[in-house]
Image (tube, helix red, strand yellow):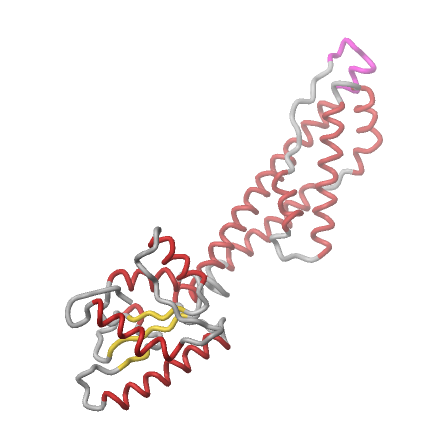
Amino acid sequence: MPFAGRSPRNKKYWTNHFEQILKPCINTPDFPADRSSPLRKDVLREIISNLIFSRIVLADITSLNKNVMWELGVRQSFRNGTIVIAESGTKVPFDITTKSIIFYPKLSDSDYTNELIKFKNQLKKAVEDCKNNPDTPDSHILEIISGRGSIYEIISREETIRKIGALIDELEFNICLLPELDRNIEFNRVYMDNPQAGGVDLTLRFRTYSVELLLTTRYLIQNADFYESLLKYFDDLERLNSQIDSFPRDRRSTVGWFKMHRHEIGDFNCILSTIKTIHEGEKERIYL
């Protein structure tokens, strides 16, 4: 609520409103009610901290005070457990009209006493509900950014699609590199038999960043067979890179390894085909 305001809702009004009406309804020994104070050193830091970490936040939007509305937005961006109240007759902004608001009577209302009793009972029930059901959604923001079909899910899926795209690029690079490596190995094999033919250096390495990320985080929901084939692909890349690294030290051993073990390297195109199918499926799901 505001700290002060124009008459009749001045500083004294808001203080009495909290101390005499609201606090008796919500204050308990194990759940003390507190009102943000403007006297502390870092006011904004303290307010934001309270808004985020308090189990329950009560917001009085009667005066449509800009600071109060901003604080309500901050709170509802982080967690549920928010109770909104207002004086009867308040013109509630459209943005929050679909969430329940508890109204308290004006002092000028003819049945003020009875209406105030009703308000206090509603407020007590709302506080108890927040205590007992802390995960009950009461924030449009959290509803939209979390859960199935939410903005968060869409953003997460878009990130997954980008990761798969990077994996496809990596696979296509490795597939293009494999025949080039085979040719260079063959040149060096001929060189071993005939030094005058001339050998070539092995300068390029197979890329493993994207496949290693997938194997580490398992960000795709796939069965065990998929990840076993992916692990075999990764192991093949590691074996190939290990031979490329050892080539400058012992060319003959590297050429001999390829002669004996090249047939053990799996078909990268099969992995690529599977990943592309998953990629298309993920792109379709994001727009469903």
Residue 199 magenta-highlighted: no
Q: Residue at x 46, y 59 (%)?
A: 287
Q: Where is residue 138 in the image (x, y as percent from the top left)?
A: 41, 71
190 magenta-colored: yes
Q: In the figure, 124 relative to 179: above or below? A: below
* Magenta stretch: helix, strand or loop mostly: helix
* Between 171 and 4, the one nearer to me in the picture: 4
User: What percent of the width, then of the height, locates residue 182?
Assistant: 72, 28
Residue nearer the viewer, 130 or 233 = 130
Q: Residue furthest top?
A: 196
Q: Where is residue 178 shown, x and y percent of the image?
A: 69, 32
- Residue ID at (20%, 82%): 107
Q: Give the range drawn in magenta.
A: 186-198
In the image: residue 233, left or right of residue 93: right
Q: Which of 57 and 257 is in front in this view?
A: 57
Q: Which of 246 and 28 is in front in this view?
A: 28
Which residue is depicted at the point 31% across and 74% down? 19
